[in-house]
């Protein structure tokens, strides 16, 4: 294919996407007031995500809102709004995550406006999903930029290690420890650019289900496709430094995934207490 043909093809795709995007924006403008009026937790959380992403809302306010919603849901509420009993058989066949959008939601999560909005949100870097971790599986230590995320343990026992990245120089990072514990159902972890923005997750139970909400590319510094591919910056925590800080080292994805999750020093958190 010639360069001219390639350019023409790319232009054609862009022209087809533009009307679809405009229509999506019109539908979104129609459903967002309905999200604000819905008293259920997830529609209002999704609207808060739209406000932070599209209207310039504060990401730390979104993280605080997310933490409050996940705390109020707890494990039982998380199982209800995700329809865990209904999708359990499907989750048993999944190796990492199950996306929640559109008609995959149960009625308990939200009505028609919420289902429509969640499908539109997915194309704008705002997603809900269920993470599936089996015993010994981990999500390698990594940091995010311009991202707010929250994870709620719905079933199982999950290890969370989180850190604030307080400084970086070359391959080194200075990390302030946050969470370090085993969390049962109802346990949660939230992060933003300024709060626990490096996290490391490990599954302890035979199967662990984690309900996750994520808003990426806040500030829209990149195109959405480019933001997804650059979402993670892998960093391996290492030695403890004076003052309780930890030395981190920026690494490749392969190296981070090969690093064992540290089991020593984990607190046992009774999330149902």
Image (cartoon, rainbow, N blue to C red):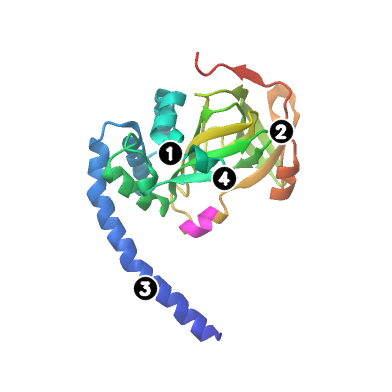
- The total number of labels drawn is 4
Residue at 40% over, 30% down:
80
Q: Tell me which corner region of the image, top left, top right, bottom left or bottom right, holds residue 183.
A: top right
Q: Earlier in the sequence, mark 2 or mark 4?
A: 4
Nearer mark to the viewer, of 2 and 4: 4
Label 4 or label 1, whichever comes before in sequence order? 1
Tag 4 residue: 94
Q: Earlier in the sequence, mark 1 or mark 3?
A: 3
Name the front one of labels 1 and 3.
3
Q: Residues within 10 Å of mark 1 (few under 14, many from 20)?
A: many
| Residue 117 magenta-highlighted | no
Q: CA separation, marks 2 and 1?
A: 29 Å
Between marks 3 and 4 in the image, the one whose residue lies nearer the viewer: 4
Where residue 71 appears, x then y in whole percent?
Answer: 43, 24
The label on residue 59 is 1
| Horizontal arrangement in the rendering, residue 211 relative to residue 262 (left or right) | left
Q: Which residue is mark 2?
A: 261
Q: Horizontal placement of 35 versus 201: left or right?
A: left
Query: In the current view of this chain or complex, which residue is farthest to the top?
Result: 273
Q: Are marks 2 and 1 in contact (CB under 8 Å)?
A: no
Left or right position of 176 against 54: right
Which stretch is magenta? 224-228
- Mark 3 in CB contact with mark 2 (< 8 angstroms): no
Q: Which residue is mark 3?
A: 15
Provide residue 225's location: percent of width, then percent of height. Answer: 50, 59
């Amino acid at each position: 294919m010639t360069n001219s043909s390639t350019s023409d093809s790319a232009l054609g795709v862009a022209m087809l996407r533009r009307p679809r995007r405009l229509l999506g924006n019109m539908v979104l403008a129609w459903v967002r007031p309905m999200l604000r009026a819905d008293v259920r937790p997830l529609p209002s959380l999704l609207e808060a995500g739209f406000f932070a992403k599209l209207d310039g809302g504060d990401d730390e306010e979104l993280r605080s809102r997310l933490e409050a919603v996940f705390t109020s849901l707890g494990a039982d509420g998380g199982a209800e709004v995700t329809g865990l009993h209904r999708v359990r058989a499907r989750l048993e066949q999944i190796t990492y995550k199950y996306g929640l959008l559109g008609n995959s939601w149960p009625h308990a999560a939200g009505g028609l406006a919420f289902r429509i909005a969640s499908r539109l949100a997915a194309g704008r870097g705002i997603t809900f999903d269920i993470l599936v971790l089996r015993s010994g599986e981990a999500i390698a230590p990594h940091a995010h930029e311009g991202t707010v995320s929250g994870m709620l343990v719905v079933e199982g026992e999950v290890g969370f290690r989180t850190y604030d990245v307080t400084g970086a120089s070359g391959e080194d990072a200075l990390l302030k420890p946050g969470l370090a514990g085993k969390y049962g159902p109802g346990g949660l972890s939230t992060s933003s650019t300024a709060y626990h923005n490096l996290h490391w997750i490990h599954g302890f139970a035979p199967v662990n289900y984690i309900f996750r909400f994520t808003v990426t590319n806040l500030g829209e510094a990149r195109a959405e496709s480019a933001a997804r591919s650059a979402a993670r910056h892998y960093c391996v925590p290492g030695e403890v430094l004076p003052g309780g800080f930890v030395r981190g080292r920026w690494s490749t994805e392969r190296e981070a995934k090969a690093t064992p999750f540290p089991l020593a020093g984990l607190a046992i958190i009774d999330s149902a207490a």
